[in-house]
Image: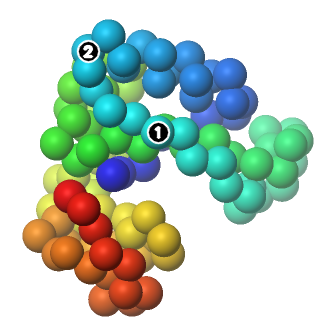
Amino acid sequence: MLDYCGFLSLEDARHARDLLRPRRIQSEIVIRDASESGPAHRSGEEYWLRVPARSFPQAAEVLGHDAAEGSESVQTGTFACSECGESVGEDESFCAHCGARFDE
């Protein structure tokens, strides 16, 4: 799964996920501690929508996001490890940094 994009509110992330469902694009919402503080992160949380790497272009089409802006890992054949965030090759079955195993 790749981080597709971040949202300022959980409601916005849910709305985006709901737009993907009719197209049968699998997605999940990840809630993280905010890496920055300030007005945009009043709750101290960040909300990220994650999609499978193979579905990234379709998600970008549905949500109207500029795929070039958020798809560096798709273009380079890597993705962020879901456990530690380190860059992992798309053909790898585990993260060399933390040892996490991947299903896809």
Number of callouts: 2
Q: Which of 67 and 17 is in front in this view?
A: 17
The answer, for residue 62, to whether it is visible in the render is yes
Quadrant in the picture for residue 97:
bottom left
For mark 2, what is the residue? 23
**Badge 1 density bin: few <14, some 14–19, many ≥20, Cα 10 Å:** some
The answer to whether residue 64 of the structure is visible from this angle is no
The residues tagged by marks 2 and 1 sit, at their Cα atoms, a distance apart of: 14 Å
Crowd class of label 2 (few under 14; some 14 to 19; many from 20; radius 10 Å): few
Q: Position of residue 70 (x, y in %)?
A: 37, 44
Q: Is residue 60 left or right of residue 4?
A: left
For residue 78, which quarter of the picture?
bottom left
Q: Is mark 2 on a helix, strand or loop?
A: helix
- Where 91 falls versus 68 (above or below)? below
Q: Where is residue 74 in the image (x, y as percent from the top left)?
A: 21, 52
Q: Which colour scheme is used?
A: rainbow
Q: Which residue is drawn at 17% across and 75% down?
A: 92
Relative to 14, does residue 89 appear above or below in the rendering? below
* Residue ID for mark 1: 28
Q: Which of marks 2 and 1 is nearer the N terminus?
A: 2
Left or right side of 23 for 30: right
Question: Mark 1 and mark 2 in contact (Cβ < 8 Å)?
Answer: no
* Badge 1 element: strand
Q: Which amino acid does label 2 sit on?
A: Arg
Percent position of residue 40, x then y: 79, 39
- The vertical placement of 36 against 12, above or below, is below
Where is residue 69 drawn, in percent x and y?
36, 41
Tell me what residue is drawn at x 38 percent, y 78 percent.
100
In the picture, which quadrant includes the C terminus?
A: bottom left
